[in-house]
Amino acid sequence: MSLHKIKVSVVAIILLLLTCCSSLASKPDISDARKFFEQQADFITGNARVNDFKKVNAANISDREYRLDWEAEVEYLRDIRNIVGLVHRKGEIQRVRGSYTFEMTEKGWDFKRQ
């Protein structure tokens, strides 16, 4: 094998490894899900805060979609009422679970609206 073929092979292997590693690292992570979760009204208005937010599971749905399952602990900082009455008491802690689906766009991963 000539020196040129060896160099080309080494460069090809390096590019392949970089491509694989960058695609693995570019998946949405728990901070992306938490940021979206905290954009809900109770957090924006200061009625609640997230004490804990963790990933439960994650999976590729397709090449362009990724699902992240999460669990959060929410603490209510004041009484929350709606038209029917009291919904949450100040100091109440609630565990909630859910999942978000992200889709690959031209600008990277974005939350997929259902």
Image (cartoon, helix red, strand yellow):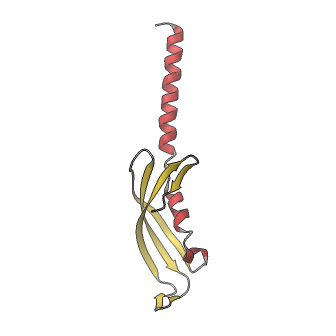
Q: In front: 85, or 34?
A: 85
**Residue drawn at the location 55% of the way across and 86% of the way down:** 78
Toward the top, the furthest residue is: 2
Toward the bottom, the furthest residue is: 85
Count every numbered label the image shows and give the total: 0
Quadrant occupied by the C terminus: bottom left
Q: Does residue 43 appear left or right of residue 1 in this picture?
A: right
Indicate the position of residue 38 as horizontal and vertical percent values. 55, 69
Toward the front, the furthest residue is: 114
Check the image and report above or below for 68 versus 26.
Answer: below
Indicate the position of residue 36 as horizontal and vertical percent values. 54, 64
Check the image and report above or below for 11 versus 32.
Answer: above
**Residue drawn at the location 49% of the way across and 48% of the way down:** 27
Indicate the position of residue 33 as horizontal and vertical percent values. 50, 60
**Residue drawn at the location 50% of the way across and 13% of the way down:** 6
**Residue drawn at the location 55% of the way across and 75% of the way down:** 49
Indicate the position of residue 93 as horizontal and vertical percent values. 46, 79
Check the image and report above or below for 114 versus 90.
Answer: above
